[in-house]
Amino acid sequence: MRGFWPILKRELVSLFVTPIAWLIMATFLFIEGLFFYFLVYGYSAATDVVVGMGPAEAFFGQSEFYYFPLVLICPVLTMRLFAEERRSGTIEALLTAPVTPTAVVLGKYFATLVVYVTMWAPTSLYMLILSSYGEIDWRLVATGYAGTLLVGAAYLAVGTLASALTTSQLAASMGATVFILAFFVMGYAARSFDDGTTRTMLEHVAVSSLMNDFSRGLVDSRRLVFWTTFAAVPLYAAIRTVESWRWG
């Protein structure tokens, strides 16, 4: 992957010197902060306690407010990766440089993944706050963040492909959002089916099912395979798309 590190550094600089990454992170942390506040407030006011479901587990897996913002935030993070370069004409200079299409795609993709991880990092303070008032299981916290990373990796991969397929940042963002939202909705559509193959399939692809399991420390290899594939397939398609530009 000749050129991966220069591309990664270039994208990180371009992301952090513009206000978009900081605005996204500030908005995201505001939403998650409100969710954490109301979650803790709800637990402090609750009279009935569910055994085995503390605020840390509930934070990761019991509310859409934890992962629904990603449906909108991940496409916005990735929308400019290729669309803006193609619109401005700078992609030609990049493609004539001694770098491979794989390095270009993965360098840009991992730059957004670094921003994604940076965006979530301050939420670890929530766990420290909880630990100062009671005992929490750090293994569940670790698996909760692992599930969060899997979801983000898949959503960012979809956004990367969407950006490679258009010259419009708005179209890239909307296309990725619609695709991700469809998977998000399927998890809730499963509730309308009786127990059977259809319901099992829909629950398997649902982000809510993944986070419910991971928030309790249940790491299912089938979910790992699905969400890893969910990230790998769009990235492969994006690499092939970028490769076609050199010959088209």
Image (cartoon, grey):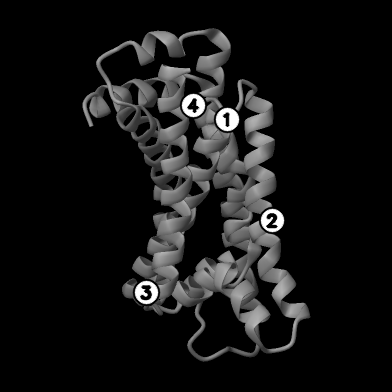
Judging depth in this view, the residue of 232 and 145 nearest the camera is 232
Q: How far apart are labels 2 and 3 at the CA level? A: 23 Å
The nearer-to-camera label among 2 and 1 is 1
User: Label 3 sits on what residue type?
Assistant: Ser
Considering only order in the chain, which callout, 3 or 1, is on the residue closer to the N terminus?
A: 1
Pointer 2: what residue? Answer: 182
Q: Are marks 2 and 1 in contact (CB under 8 Å)?
A: no
What's the distance in space between the residues labelled 4 and 2, CA to CA?
Answer: 23 Å
Residue at the spot of label 3: 221
Judge whether residue 32 can be spotted in this image: yes
Mark 2–mark 1 Cα distance, whole angstroms, equals: 19 Å
User: Does the residue at mark 4 contact the one at mark 2 (Cβ under 8 Å)?
Assistant: no
> How many discs mark residues in the rendered view?
4
**Tag 1: Cα neighbours inside 10 Å, few (<14), some, or many (≥20)?**
some
Q: Nearer the viewer, residue 95 or 15?
A: 95
Q: Secondary structure at mark 4?
A: loop
Q: CA distance from mark 4 to mark 3?
A: 31 Å
Residue at left 67%, top 39%?
175
Quarter of image, res 191: bottom right
- Spot occupied by residue 165 in the image (x, y as percentages of width and height): 58, 30
Q: Earlier in the sequence, mark 4 or mark 3?
A: 4
Q: In the rendering, at what x and y percent does residue 135 appear?
A: 37, 78
> Residue under circle 1?
165
Distance from the alpha carbon under mark 1 to that under mark 3: 32 Å
Furthest-left residue in view? 2
Q: Which residue is mark 4?
A: 81
In the depicted structure, whether residue 87 falls above or below residue 180: above
Amino acid type at circle 1 is: Leu
Badge 2 amino acid:
Ala
